[in-house]
């Protein structure tokens, strides 16, 4: 249990670090939200550890790292975490492609929340390429599951 | 996926119900956003949180810096020699110009003293490195390795060797965030060096393009004009190059011409920038207000880089 908690925090921290690692321009726009994907994975695999509180803190830290309005990503992470908790029993029965589709919807909702709060706070950017991370994140989902399952199997 | 033994939540020791927790945290995030945006009261909280984020930012920057350092130390002799020759030649040229400028500056200062206005020339500058950290792909912000401990303040002008780069937008203990002049939320008051027409250059979100939306069809702006900072608003020192006009499109029907300019500073390639201190020019001079296009006079807080 403790090992899992450490793994949870470690993977989210890695996701947060990768959120600000410099990338070339074209890759930068489609950078997947690895921290959020890690949160979703942990909620599905061990919901006792990954509660809403943890997801919220991770989002808040992302706000600080990227110099955004405080609470913006925190709200996005929170909504996604809440829905994942609600759908958790169903989602973990899905086959992987089906699961990736569910993740796609969750990511779309997350980016919509960011887009919406951006607009409310006057930073609106309306280009189509701000929605690219939704797609790249969903495509990455099978890999996240594979990596996470390998990690948890070893810890048992 | 994984085993089913992990029940969704244990029956005992569940803590507060999920829905209640969600509502509480959602209310907390909304309160945070309102406090941050509307009232700007979270500077201190952000400062603490940033101290926690600082090690991570440095850790990410480090490998890139190490790589640069390694690449530098293994640069071959010919390359170094070539660079050295090039720099010597450039230094000679710069010194030559400097000799002329020293006299001019002296004369300028004397004239300004006669008119009783302060100089508005950059007095002191420190070099800040841009940390290798991506903040947001759609905003032109960079993280500098100088913060409040170096005396950096909010609204400080940031320059590079070729012109105006941006201004400091948020100061942390050891780092600061700068907003580039090309950010879509930034605007800077400029003046054509050739004709003296004043206007405002607005960022477009493209590092190679500024837009000048308040140029009327009759204004004397031509392709190739150098735009310099006016110093109005007191953020930027006056007289530094900002951009060069690349496109002027006038049409008989539209009131305003479509004017675009290319920043002289290497906004997307700089690794090091200058943070400058200068005496704000005294706001006494108000020459020929007539040749200023009307909208620029009423544009809200042009030099602050605040939301338009």
Image: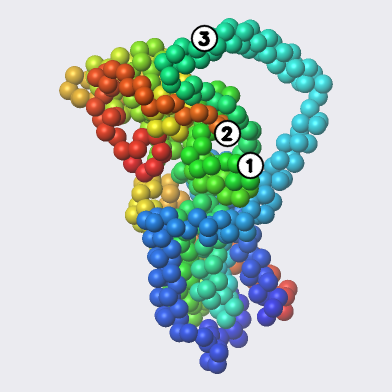
User: Which of the numbered marks, if any, corresponds to residue B107?
Assistant: 3
Query: Which residue is more in the foreground, B128 or B264?
Result: B128
Outermost residue toward the left in this view: B253
Secondary element at image label 3:
helix
Residue beneath label 1, please?
A: B150
Which quadrant of the view contains residue B96?
A: top right
Secondary element at image label 1:
helix
Secondary element at image label 2:
strand
Residue beneath label 2, please?
A: B275
Determine if marks 1 and 2 fall on one subunit.
yes
At a point 67% along the width and 54% down the height, the residue shown is B55
Tell me which label, 1 or 2, sits earlier in the chain.
Answer: 1
**How far from the left and from the top, in percent, is residue B210?**
40, 29
**How far from the left and from the top, in percent, is residue B194?**
39, 12
Tell me which label, 3 or 2, sits earlier in the chain.
Answer: 3
Chain designation of label 1: B
Q: CA distance from mark 3 to mark 2?
A: 26 Å
**How far from the left and from the top, in percent, is residue B34?**
38, 60
Q: CA distance from mark 1 to mark 2?
A: 10 Å
Chain designation of label 3: B
Query: Which residue is more in the foreground, A24 or B39?
Result: B39
Check whether the beta carbons of the residues at disc 1 and disc 2 lie within 8 A of each other: yes
Front disc: 1 or 2: 1
At a point 79% along the width and 27% down the height, the residue shown is B75
**How far from the left and from the top, in percent, is residue B305?**
41, 39
């Amino acid at each position: 249990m403790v090992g899992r908690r450490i793994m949870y925090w470690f993977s989210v921290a890695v996701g947060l670090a990768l959120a600000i690692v410099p990338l070339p321009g074209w890759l930068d726009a489609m950078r997947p939200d690895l921290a959020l994907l890690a949160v979703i994975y942990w909620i599905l695999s061990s919901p006792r550890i990954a509660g809403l509180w943890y997801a919220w803190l991770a989002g808040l830290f992302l706000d600080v790292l990227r110099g955004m309005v405080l609470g913006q990503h925190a709200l996005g992470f929170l909504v996604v975490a809440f829905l994942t908790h609600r759908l958790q029993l169903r989602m973990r029965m899905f086959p992987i492609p089906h699961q990736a589709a569910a993740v796609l919807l969750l990511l779309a909702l997350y980016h919509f929340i960011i887009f919406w709060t951006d607009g409310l706070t006057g930073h609106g950017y309306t280009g189509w390429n701000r929605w690219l991370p939704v797609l790249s994140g969903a495509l990455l989902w099978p890999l996240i599951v594979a990596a996470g399952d390998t990690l948890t199997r070893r810890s048992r | 996926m994984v085993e089913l033994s992990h029940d969704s939540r244990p029956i005992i020791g569940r803590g507060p119900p999920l829905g209640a927790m969600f509502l509480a945290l959602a209310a907390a995030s909304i309160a945070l956003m309102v406090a941050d945006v509307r009232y700007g009261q979270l500077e201190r909280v952000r400062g603490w949180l940033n101290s926690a984020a600082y090690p991570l930012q440095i850790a990410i920057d480090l490998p890139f810096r190490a790589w640069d350092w390694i690449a530098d130390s293994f640069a071959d002799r010919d390359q170094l020699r070539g660079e050295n020759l090039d720099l010597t030649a450039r230094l000679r040229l710069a010194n030559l110009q400097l000799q002329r400028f020293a006299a001019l500056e002296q004369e300028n200062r004397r004239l300004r003293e006669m008119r009783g206005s302060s100089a508005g020339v950059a007095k002191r500058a420190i070099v800040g490195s841009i940390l290798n950290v991506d903040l947001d792909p759609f905003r032109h912000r960079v993280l500098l390795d100088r913060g409040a401990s170096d005396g950096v303040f909010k609204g400080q002008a940031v320059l590079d060797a070729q012109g105006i780069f941006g201004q400091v937008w948020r100061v942390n203990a050891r780092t600061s965030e700068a907003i580039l002049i090309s950010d879509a939320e930034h605007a800077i008051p400029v003046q054509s060096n050739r004709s003296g027409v004043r206007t405002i250059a607005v960022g477009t979100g493209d590092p190679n393009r500024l837009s000048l939306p308040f140029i009327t069809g009759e204004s004397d702006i031509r392709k190739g004009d150098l735009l310099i900072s006016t110093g109005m608003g007191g953020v930027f020192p006056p007289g530094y190059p900002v951009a060069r006009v690349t496109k002027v499109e006038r049409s008989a029907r539209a009131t305003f011409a479509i004017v675009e300019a290319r920043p002289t500073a290497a906004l997307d390639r700089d690794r090091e920038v200058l943070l400058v201190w200068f005496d704000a020019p005294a706001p006494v001079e108000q020459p020929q207000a007539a040749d200023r296009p009307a909208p620029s006079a009423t544009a809200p807080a042009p030099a602050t880089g605040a939301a338009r």
